[in-house]
Image (tube, rainbow, N blue to C red):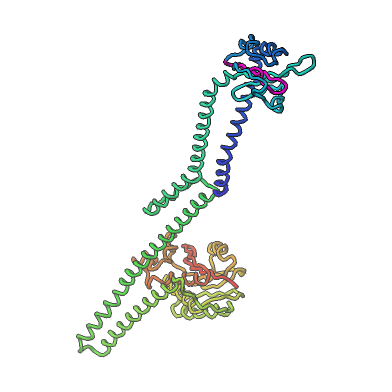
Amino acid sequence: MKLKYWLMLAFLIVMLLPVAAGWALFSLYSYYENQRAVAEYVELSGRFAPIEKALDHPKLYQLHSPEHHPILPELASEQVSFNLYLPSGIRVYSSGGNTWSSGGYTVRSSELYRNLYNLQIRHRTFSLKKPVWNHGELAGIYEITMLRQDWLEGISNRTTWVVSGAALFFVLLYGTVLWLLSRKLFSPMRVLMDRMHAFARGEKQDGVRANIRNDEMGTLLQQFDAMQQTVRQTQAEVEKQQKEKEMIVASLSHDLKTPLMSISAYAEAISMDSRSERLERQGYRDVIARNVERMKQMIGELEMYTALGSSDSELAMVEVEGEEFFEMLLGSYEGLGERDHYNMLVSVRTKHLYRIHPESLMRLTDNLVHNALRYTPSEGRIGLAVIDSVEELPEWMNPILRAELDPYRTGATIMVVQNEGAAIPPEQLERIFEPYVQYHKQERHGFAGGSGLGLSIARRIALKHGGDMRMWSSEQYGTAAVCRLPEL
């Protein structure tokens, strides 16, 4: 139940419960009083009978002096009293001892004749009025009043019970309300505050979960957990990016140190050895120029990697016809394979249109191809292919690789750059896309050449195009870098 509805219902119950309890107590009290009154009347009816018999005498209903009623004082007691009235309403006798003359105390007829024969049960007394007849004529009316002694004696006990019951009801009601408020509000708020304090102290509480609730507090706890998870993920991402930046700076500093030292050494040699031959000095200049070009390339790749990682950078996409563009793109590498004595296999099978950024996609392909050339042994085979989602994969692909690529290319076009050579260990297949992480070739006892940003840049270009990039490697078919591109 929603918390606001629960609070509204709780307040309504708290308001209605005392009223219901008071009504129930009053009903119980009335029922008990009526039952007790009947029991008392039955119990005391024996005492009414002789009094009624004595008062049912017409001669008593005349204006006399008290001496004419010698038996009447004996009928009265502390618990029983009575009055005698003439039909006109004049009281002729009172058990209190006062007798009135015709000009004395008079009761109005409407009051005198009210409730004749009816037993009147009051809080403290029973009252009974009856007429007295003399040869068919009304001689007078007597009224007997009997004190409810047992009832009055039990009033203090009943008062104690009522007060105790009311106090117990209040305590139970108050305790129930506090328990419900604690269960619905205080306990979840305490849990939330503990989580907030733990989160502020940097403590992890991934295993702590409150009971699933369907009210606002449950929603608040779930949203706090979601926010906490999001903040932690953001912090982890920021830490990862910070470490990545530190690693890039350290790697770049290390990579720039070698060409800088070479430039410094050859520049010093040129300046100090003026007697060197012209060809030797030109060789020094060529070395300096190559190192400068290498440094410019490294800095350019770093700039591109940083720009592709920015969320603000957008590539200017254009729509191209796939078959024409990719045949031109992949065909430019056939001459490179012939020059370096590689068997270059090219296959383009697509009829789709694509939205791409040509320059960056050319950079992606160039990085993958030069990476393949670096790892392929002499006279080895390199395969280049662009296959859309409905075309068959090239025949030169290993059947095992074809089986692995079919699920990956569902609904999209793939660009494959496959080379022969040593397989990359499975634990390094994902890490090689990280900046400045390269596959360690055991036979060379070192890392492969290059700046270490080629595959990282290629994956970021693929992501900018709405695609993805993965790497497959096996001793049976070599290594395949696969870029997945969405189709129009």
Rendered image quadrant of residue 307: bottom left
Left or right placement of residue 136 versus residue 19 in this view: right
Q: Nearest the camera: 93 or 247?
A: 93
Horizontal relation, residue 230 to residue 94: left or right:
left
Frontmost residue, 15 versus 61 = 61
Range covered by the magenta-colored residues: 78-95
Residue 176, given in percent of the width and then of the height, sits at: 51, 38
Q: Residue at x 56, y 76 (%)?
A: 355
Would you say residue 118 is visible in this rendering?
A: yes
Give residue 77's position: percent from left, percent from top: 59, 14
User: Quick one: 365 or 395, which is closer to the camera?
Assistant: 365
Q: Is residue 18 left or right of residue 130?
A: left
The residue shown at (47%, 66%) is 479
Which residue is at 58% across, 77% downward? 322
Image quadrant for the C terminus? bottom right
Relative image position of residue 234 (x, y in whole percent)? 43, 61
